[in-house]
């Protein structure tokens, strides 16, 4: 807990400069989805996964999204993180009105080029996935450092230093130089969380972070997320694990491509719209 | 960071990477050795031919054949013109006023020296052997300045022509075919009926087979008697300060004197064409080798892409763009190409030096002791640039394919 507090203080120092310069983005929600639609596939086989989702997530919120498989919760998460872009038109080619957009820290992802969107992800978003996805040929420390190398804000040695600090905070101080494929599942997931935190992202997005872990490791990951949230980190998780979801201050339930319950807002049920 | 990732990926499959590097190395090395071998023979041929025959030769015929007199009278191209029983006019072909012409030529820029020659065909008879040769009647003092024939004489001496009545200097090939040695007397006869007995005062060896098997040098006056060309000079040989500009200077001289004027390039056009074909074949073979190496690179990179689809998704998720991913893979190709071609350049250089020292007797169009290797820094640059370009080209397809993966699709697929 204490160690993570230290990171939060550092974050404030680093972030102060840009925050002052863009007052409007500071006031707007961190993540905002406006009438978001997403069709996967094309033509006859196209699948309307998201059917007009509106959601705003403010700084410092800890949000969990639950729902059955195929309800579109992971898709929404990828869109909120700029890993994917919303569909502009439906299967018949009609544009959605109002247009389908996602804003990350005030930036409209639909207006960004592929490269700019990648830079935005690098700076502001940290992803954690169910299947850890570490680069197996690199050590734990190198895996954590890669996003920092890409950002280039820290020197190589400073980045390595920060990488080892993050891993120590997550209890992996003795596994820094171990190759990723020689770590256990729980360890790999903690390395993945450290990597997601490497560039002090504005938001941490986790897709089933405990989905592939045993009870002990799941609890550990859940504790880490709770600590981070307590330190002020904005977190959005998608999960089937109801105990994990219950830890979040704001809980969202999705069904069939729409939000059906949002504990943070007065909920509009789809039938009333 | 991209280099960091690329090199780590290459090191993971070190053995395959080394095989790829070896492919590039071998093709670069082969290019350098084959090209310098071919170039060595070409250079030897050109230099020996050029230096022993002169840079430009003026012949005793006008460049354009005269239009027939009837055609001049009836200009209509459709007119049917026929004369029966036409014979070529008997005229002694020669260069008019050669002394004046040579004096003029000496004043021209780039011309270093000129020498008069009378040429004709003759048959050598020695014992029971006969051999057709080309007689070149020359002034030994001038001939040795205009060409390097004096230095090519291995037995006897070119200067002995001056001191010996009816001396003759023959090529090594002629001497060995008829079995004549130095100071042997051989008999010569010309198609016009001239006969003489000549004494072999020198045997030359240029190393260029067509020359060594055809030429015989004599004094101008004895040749004129033998060939029945009294007071005739039918060639003027010119030496320039730079043989590469022979074509241009030849055209200029032709404009001045009006006689057919051949540069060495024109005279040896057939051989030069063969050398060009030979160069193309060399490039073709080494190009094919390089292509095989490129397929190796393509193969290892496609494999590297397919087995790292998850890596690509994760790299994209934390901020690498399409361009970054493309570069990661192109860099892997570049590293293979760089290491492979640099090692290839080194081994190529060693191979050139090694082959140069091999004691192999070569006899063909040119004769030499050992392989003739001619290297030039441009060969190394060519080999390097070609290898890098081809390997990069091979890396582009897998790199673009890698960049195209949609991280969301990859992550969903794993779910």
Image (cartoon, helix red, strand yellow):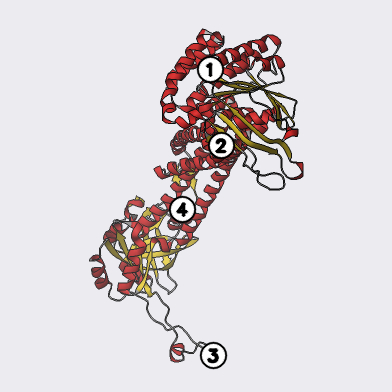
Q: Which residue is mark 1?
A: A232
Subunit of label 4 = B
Left or right? Give the position of B1 relative to B394.
Answer: left
For disc 4, the neighbor class at 10 Å (few under 14, some 14 to 19, many from 20) is: few
Mark 3 or mark 1: which is in front? 1
Q: Mark 2 = which residue?
A: A109
Residue B137 seen anywhere in this rendered image of the structure: no
Residue A271 is tagged as none
Tell me the element at label 4: helix
- Residue B100 left/right relative to A91: left
Image x and y of residue B60, in percent? 36, 73
Q: Is residue B34 left or right of residue A190?
A: left
Query: Gap in Å between the C-alphas at discs 1 and 4?
Result: 101 Å
Q: Residue at x 72, y 30 (%)?
A: A269
Task: Identify the chain of the residue marked 2, using the numbered disc in the image.
Answer: A
How far from the left and from the top, in percent, is residue A157?
43, 18
Q: CA distance from mark 3 to mark 2?
A: 86 Å
Mark toward the start of the polypeptide (2 vs 1): 2
Q: Which residue is mark 3?
A: B80
Residue A67, how many percent across, how many down? 73, 25
A123 on left or right of B299: left
Which label lies toward us, 2 or 1?
1
Q: B228 or A266: which is nearer to us? A: A266
Q: Which residue is mark 4?
A: B176
Q: Residue at x 41, y 61 (%)?
A: B265
Distance between the alpha carbons at the discs numbered 3 and 1: 108 Å
Answer whether labels 3 and 4 touch (C-beta < 8 Å).
no
In the image, which is nearer the foreground, mark 4 or mark 2?
A: 2
């Amino acid at each position: 807990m204490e160690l993570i507090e230290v990171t939060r203080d550092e974050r404030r120092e680093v972030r102060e400069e840009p925050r002052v310069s863009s007052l409007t983005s500071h006031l707007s929600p961190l993540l905002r989805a406006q009438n978001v639609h997403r069709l996967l596939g094309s033509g006859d086989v196209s699948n309307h996964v998201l059917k007009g989702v509106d959601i705003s997530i403010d700084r410092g919120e800890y949000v969990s999204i639950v729902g059955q498989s195929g309800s579109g919760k992971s898709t929404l998460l990828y869109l909120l993180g700029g890993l994917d872009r919303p569909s502009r038109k439906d299967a018949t080619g009609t544009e959605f009105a109002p247009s389908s957009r996602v804003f990350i820290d005030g930036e409209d992802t639909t207006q960004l080029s592929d490269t700019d969107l990648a830079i935005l992800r690098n700076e502001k978003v940290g992803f954690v996935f169910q299947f850890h996805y570490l680069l197996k040929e690199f050590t734990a420390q190198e895996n954590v450092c890669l996003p920092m190398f890409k950002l280039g804000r820290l020197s190589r040695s400073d980045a390595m230093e920060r990488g080892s600090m993050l891993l120590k905070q997550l209890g992996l101080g003795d596994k820094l130089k171990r190759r990723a494929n020689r770590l256990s599942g729980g360890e790999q997931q903690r390395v993945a969380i450290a990597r997601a935190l490497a560039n002090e992202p504005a938001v941490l997005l986790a897709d089933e972070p405990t989905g592939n872990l045993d009870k002990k490791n799941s609890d550990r990951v859940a504790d880490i997320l709770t600590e981070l949230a307590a330190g002020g980190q904005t977190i959005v998780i998608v999960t089937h694990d109801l105990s994990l979801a219950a830890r979040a201050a704001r809980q969202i339930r999705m069904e069939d491509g729409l939000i059906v319950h949002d504990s943070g807002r007065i909920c509009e049920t789809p039938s009333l719209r | 960071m991209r280099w960091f990732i690329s090199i780590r990926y290459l090191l993971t499959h070190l053995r395959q990477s080394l095989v790829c590097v070896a492919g590039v190395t071998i093709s670069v090395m082969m290019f350098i050795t084959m090209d310098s071998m071919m170039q060595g023979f070409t250079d030897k041929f050109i230099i020996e031919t050029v230096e022993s025959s002169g840079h430009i030769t003026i012949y005793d015929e006008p460049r354009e054949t005269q239009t027939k007199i009837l055609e001049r009278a009836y200009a209509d191209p459709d007119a049917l013109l026929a004369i029966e029983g036409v014979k070529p006019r008997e005229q002694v072909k020669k260069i008019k006023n050669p002394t004046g012409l040579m004096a003029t030529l000496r004043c021209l820029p780039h011309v270093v020296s000129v020498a008069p020659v009378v040429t004709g065909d003759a048959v050598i008879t020695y014992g029971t052997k006969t051999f057709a040769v080309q007689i070149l009647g020359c002034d030994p003092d001038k001939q040795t300045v205009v060409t390097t024939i004096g230095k090519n004489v291995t037995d006897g001496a070119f200067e002995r022509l001056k001191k010996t009545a009816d001396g003759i200097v023959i090529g090594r090939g002629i001497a060995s075919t008829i079995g004549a040695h130095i100071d042997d007397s051989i008999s010569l006869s010309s198609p016009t009926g001239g006969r003489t007995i000549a004494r072999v005062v020198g045997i030359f060896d240029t190393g260029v087979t067509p020359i060594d098997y055809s030429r015989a040098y004599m004094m101008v006056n004895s040749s004129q008697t033998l060939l029945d060309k009294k007071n005739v000079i039918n060639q003027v040989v010119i030496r320039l300060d730079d043989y590469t500009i022979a074509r241009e200077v030849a055209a200029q001289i032709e404009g001045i004197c009006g006689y057919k004027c051949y540069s060495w390039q024109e005279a040896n056009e057939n051989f030069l064409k063969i050398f060009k074909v030979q160069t193309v074949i060399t490039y073709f073979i080494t190009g094919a080798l390089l292509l095989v190496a490129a397929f190796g690179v393509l193969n290892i990179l496609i494999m590297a892409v397919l087995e790292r689809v998850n890596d690509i998704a994760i790299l994209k998720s934390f901020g690498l763009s399409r361009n970054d991913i493309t570069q990661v893979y192109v860099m892997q190709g570049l590293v293979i190409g760089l290491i492979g071609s640099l090692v290839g350049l080194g081994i190529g250089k060693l191979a050139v030096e090694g082959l140069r020292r091999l004691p192999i007797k070569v006899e063909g169009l040119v004769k030499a002791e050992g392989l003739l290797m001619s290297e030039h820094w441009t060969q190394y640059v060519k080999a390097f640039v070609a290898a890098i370009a081809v390997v990069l080209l091979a890396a582009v397809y897998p790199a673009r394919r890698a960049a195209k993966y949609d991280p969301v699709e990859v992550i969903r697929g794993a779910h």
